[in-house]
Amino acid sequence: MTLYTLIFFLFWYPSHGVHTRLGGSRFGRRQARGLSANMQTRHVPSRSSAFDGKVLDETEFGVRESVLESSRESDTKYSFEEIRAEHYFGLDHVTTETDPSCTPTTAVCIPDRRDWSNHFAHATQRLLPCFAVLNRMHSNLSWVVVQKGVEQYRAKMSSWNTGLLKAMQVEVRDNVTGLECKVTSTIRHCPGAYCLNGMDDALELHRRMGLSGSISGKSADHFKVGILNRARSRHWSGASPFIGTASQDFPHAEFEEAYFENMTFAEQARWVNKQDFIISTHGAAETNLLFARRCIGVIELSPENYYIPQWFASLANAVGAQFYGGYPEGRNGRADTKVKWDCCREQMRSAPVLARPDSVLTFLKQAVVQQTRCYQGGADVSTQDRTK
């Protein structure tokens, strides 16, 4: 009797819970198992405290920022941790209704964030869950996302938003007036800052845009590192010294620094998609991580007293990337941020990033090892999928 019980358990356990998520993938589970035992990893559940809920509910981008002048060198030693943030949601968070007595020709999605935001990063938060649901459930229909107030912003819609809607092949409108024979999916809850059901949704978007779907990490010697910097607030002055030193340690790697302020939607997407590692200061430009390839290593640098890595970790994790949050060593970023949030948020989020280049390079070397493990696990799964 004991033997039969054991056999049943061995067959039952690996599949238990797989169907509770639209995006559960064997590649994602293999990626998680490949991490080294000595790297600190923090799982960040959505809204695990009142403060977490407050952070996620507030508008993170598009608010006034000051530019703080600083003559300091990048002289602060940073430490890093891997962040795994919640990004998925199951069908139990989606309600679907179909117009009676007709065959649907249009699929409508109503996200949990009901009002349109003219800031491209927040607009993306509204569009991504709908893209995931429509892609999985109604791929053969035309797609409409309902957002109250979009018409008043349409004439001034950012070119980034326009480009994303075109790539997704989604129409966004105020209401469903005039739409007949539709199936409507309403998302009741999206737990993270950015929600997708899994890597398959990101890969489908990459395919539509002609981006590479390959896995990063094929070589631990020849790879591309992009530094996504900011010209004004949260500027990292250590970027150039970092490139000089890192190029000596990795002579076969390619390093480049970019600023997205004057790049088009397509240029930003292609830049992100070609990198194997991205070192970025925290900011809305990281919304472009949507176009990153699987196993890419994302190293985010936050200014002192402003550390909310779960924002973009949720997006990076959704596309199969490994995300690492960097903050001054010996400090508690979460506690520092909580203390300063109500009184000094705008000032803290605008401060320059003073990460010492050598501390970032030290961690990059660890991230290279992690990426190799991720690539090996992902390549194994991709081979298995092709042989089915």
Image (cartoon, rainbow, N blue to C red):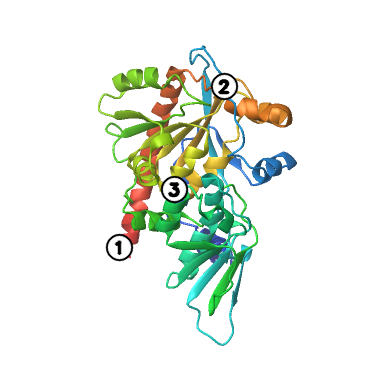
**Nearer the observer, disc 1 or disc 3?**
3
Number of marks present in the image shown: 3
* Image coordinates for residue 272, horizontal then vertical, percent: 38, 41
Q: Specify whether 186 is left or right of 36.
A: right
Q: Residue at x 47, y 17 (%)?
A: 356
Q: Residue furthest bottom?
A: 101
Q: Amino acid at mark 2?
A: Pro
Label 3 environment density (alpha carbons within 10 Å; few <14, some 14–19, many ≥20): few
Residue ID for mark 3:
159
Distance CA(mark 1)–CA(mark 3): 41 Å
The N terminus - image quarter? bottom right
Dot 2: element? strand
**Considering depth in this image, is 323 or 7 the residue closer to the camera?**
323
**Considering depth in this image, is 6 or 67 the residue closer to the camera?**
67
Q: Earlier in the sequence, mark 1 or mark 3?
A: 3
* Image coordinates for residue 252, horizontal then vertical, percent: 25, 28
Seen in the picture, residue 360 relative to 159 is either above or below; the reply is above
**Considering depth in this image, is 201 or 44 the residue closer to the camera?**
201
Distance CA(mark 3)–CA(mark 2): 36 Å
Distance CA(mark 2)–CA(mark 1): 46 Å
Residue ID for mark 1:
387
State whether residue 130 appears in this view: yes
Label 1 environment density (alpha carbons within 10 Å; few <14, some 14–19, many ≥20): few
Q: Residue at x 54, y 76 (%)?
A: 182
Q: Earlier in the sequence, mark 2 or mark 1?
A: 2
* Image coordinates for residue 259, horizontal then vertical, percent: 41, 32
**Nearer the observer, disc 3 or disc 2?**
3
Q: Specify whether 312 is left or right of 211.
A: right
Question: Mark on residue 328?
Answer: 2
Dot 3: element? helix
Q: Specify whether 353 is left or right of 361.
A: right
State whether residue 7 appears in this view: no
